[in-house]
Amino acid sequence: MNISKRIIELRKSKGYSTNKLATLAGLSQGFVRQVELGEKQPTVDSLSKICVGLNISLGDFFSDETELSLDIRQLITVAKTLTPDQRRALHTFLELMKK
């Protein structure tokens, strides 16, 4: 896996600039930019901070890119926290959106 490309892909999917990601991750913009350019390799700690900034887990970061997209996985994560009644209401809402 190309870590640099994965960070860029995830950052862009969130609509974040490099500066916003750096701020959310508590890292310098220069460092995040160097990682994205492949000039530096992140440590586990800094990659973990980047994941926090992206609001994803390390597992999500390393998941197979051909699986469900990040936004779909995030919807599933939220749906898991809903009560059965809320899930039924969400399902009804989504079905109505398809029309």
Image (cartoon, rainbow, N blue to C red):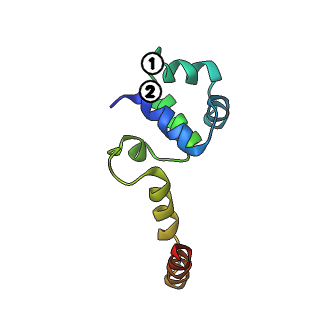
Q: Pointers 1 and 2 in contact (CB under 8 A)?
A: yes
Tell me: 18 left or right of 61: right
Q: Identify which residue is drawn at 42% across, 41% down.
A: 61
Closer to the camera, 92 or 4? 92
Q: Residue furthest top?
A: 39
User: What is the x, y in percent for residue 5?
Assistant: 43, 30
Quarter where residue 73 is shown: bottom left
- Report crowding for label 1: few under 14, some 14 to 19, many 20 or more residues within 10 A (C-alpha): some
Measured from the top left, where is residue 24 in percent x and y?
A: 65, 38
Q: Amino acid at mark 2?
A: Ser
Name the residue: 60% across, 35% down.
25
Report the label total.
2
Q: Circle 2 sits on which residue? A: 4
Residue 52's x, y, as percent? Answer: 55, 42
Q: Which residue position is annotated with label 1?
A: 38
Number of the label disc, if any, that sits on residue 79:
none
Specify the quadrant that holds the N terminus.
top left
Given the current orientation, which residue lies at the most extreme front position?
Answer: 99
Residue 78 vertical position relative to residue 53 in the rendered view, above or below: below
Which of disc 2 and disc 1 is earlier in sequence? 2
Kindly identify the amino acid type of the residue bearing the numbered disc 1: Gly
**Label 2: which secondary element:** helix
Q: Quick one: SS at disc 1?
A: loop
Q: Residue at x 46, y 58 (%)?
A: 72
Residue at left offset 55%, top offset 38%:
12
The crowd level at tag 2 (other Cα within 10 Å; few <14, some 14-19, many 20+) is some
What whole-number distance in Å separates the C-alpha atoms at marks 1 and 2? 6 Å
Residue 86 screen position, x and y as percent: 55, 80
